[in-house]
Image (cartoon, rainbow, N blue to C red):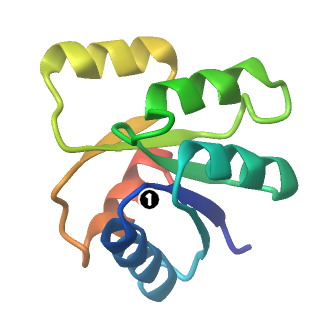
Amino acid sequence: MTKHLLVIDDEQDIRDVVKVSLEEFAGWQVETANSGKEGLQKVKIGKWDAILLDVSMPDMDGFSVFEQLQANSATKTIPVVLLTAKVLPSDRRRFMEMGVTGVITKPFNPVTVWNQVAEILQW
């Protein structure tokens, strides 16, 4: 069964690299969104096995997106993996307390990022 993932990141390069890695190496289907707002719209119209979410985005940061996902019973159970450039131990704790499934730190290796995602989600 093919997994469906949504990648929400404001950087085109990151979206492209992650999409290619997840599709080519893992064989998953990947949609992308270039903002928190677009991501939330796409979440409503698709059936997702997981969401990869950038923390720092201009219009709506990853935390706001995550809070909205958690507030909606239809999206609350979708595992969310954060993509972030800076992670302090206190941030990791905060993410876990919020219910985030995992964290992938940027920059990541494009060839192995799909593996990190699979490990975090236990696929």
In the image: residue 82, left or right of residue 90: right
Where residue 110 sits, quadrant-wise, is bottom left
Q: 8 or 90, which lies in front?
A: 8
Report the residue that reaches farthest toward the front: 59
Q: 12 or 87, which lies in front?
A: 12
SS class of the residue under badge 1?
helix
Q: Position of residue 17 (x, y in %)?
A: 34, 76
The residue carrying pointer 1 sits among few (fewer than 14), some (14 to 19) or many (20 or more) residues within 10 Å by Cα, namely few
Q: Amino acid at mark 1?
A: Ala
Q: Count of labels shown?
A: 1
Q: Position of residue 71 (x, y in %)?
A: 74, 18
Q: 97 or 45, which lies in front?
A: 45
From this view, report whether residue 14 is shown above or below residue 99. Answer: below
Q: Residue at x 29, y 14 (%)?
A: 93
From this view, report whether residue 104 is shown above or below residue 95. Answer: below
In the image: residue 109, left or right of residue 25: left
Q: Residue at x 33, y 38 (%)?
A: 56
In the image: residue 84, left or right of residue 69: left
Q: Which residue is mark 1?
A: 118
Q: Position of residue 34 (x, y in %)?
A: 52, 59
Q: Quadrant of the N terminus?
A: bottom right
Q: Residue at x 24, y 19 (%)?
A: 91
Q: Position of residue 6 (x, y in %)?
A: 60, 59
Where residue 90 sits, quadrant-wise, is top left
From this view, report whether residue 116 is shown above or below residue 120. Answer: below
In the image: residue 84, left or right of residue 4: left
Q: Residue at x 18, y 31 (%)?
A: 87
Report the residue that reaches farthest toward the bottom: 24
